[in-house]
Image: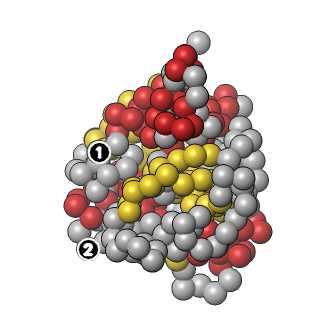
Amino acid sequence: MKKHRIAVICFPGTNCEDETMSALAAGGLAAELVRWNQPERLSGMEGAVIAGGWSYEDRIRAGVIAARDPIVAQLRSMADAGKPVLGICNGAQVLIEAGIVPLETQDAAFALAPNRNPFVAGYYCTWVCLRKAGKNGCFTALVDEVIAIPIAHGEGRFVSSEKGLAESLLKKGQVAFEYCDKEGNVAHGFPVNPNGSMANIAALTNEAGNAMAIMPHPERASFVRQLPSKEKGNFDAWGSAAPAQAIFSSMKQYLDQGCR
């Protein structure tokens, strides 16, 4: 059976492309590396993932320079056409800066501001938990449990100056994932909310649900062997899918169903 072709976008400074391609392949998708200066290669692709890293060294602010690259205009067209477009960590910052998520405009409705927590200033790396908050969609349909997942960012706090926007997006189902504890309970303070993100937002989608900006790294938690040691269980299961793999499996199901 022919597999759906997914572009993994690599900007100068991207450093998670290999893990992303492995997670996509494990989810039954055909991942192909596409560099920022190869926009013509997006022709014929059925979806795209902007991998994590530090595009353009995060100069000015994270993701803002990459968001102005010509290839991002093509990603906008893909999202408008209903194709899945996923931004992970730095990729999330790019989608937010480009305005593709959450309101599909040329201007950013949200920003990813510097982390706020009581112990660490700047970059923060740890394991957190997520729960599905929005409706079943392109990246969430097969998610049915709390996800253990790592974060690794300095600017991951979802904020907006538009009063009531976060609450409105939550009601509309555009908050795809929230930070929670291991039992799936939302607590708005640290450490459950690791960066001070408003409304405990970990991931936002566009209105159609086919473009998602997620700050934690599902590609780093897609296999049991990647989980913290106390979560791994039996050695024989280390190659099995972990809960985060459901994000990529949902993406495949969405494409299998004709992007519905």
> Label 2 is placed on what type of residue?
Ile
- Image coordinates of residue 212 in percent, x first then y, are 56, 54
- Amino acid carrying mark 1 in the image: Asn
Q: Residues within 10 Å of mark 2 (few under 14, many from 20)?
A: few
Residue 247: quarter of image: top right
**Are discs 1 and 2 less than 8 Å apart at CB?**
no
185 lies left or right of 57: right
Disc on the earlier residue, 1 or 2: 1
Mark 2 lies on a secondary structure that is loop
Residue designated by label 2: 60
Q: In front here: 58 or 255?
A: 58
245 w.r.t. 157: above or below: above
Q: Secondary structure at mark 1?
A: loop
Say whether residue 208 is left or right of residue 154.
right
Residue 69, position in %: x, y? 31, 58
Image position of 47 (left or right of 36)? right
Q: Which residue is mark 1?
A: 15
The residue at the point 29 percent across, 45 percent down is: 15
Q: Quadrant of the image for the N terminus?
A: top right
Q: Is residue 69 visible?
A: yes
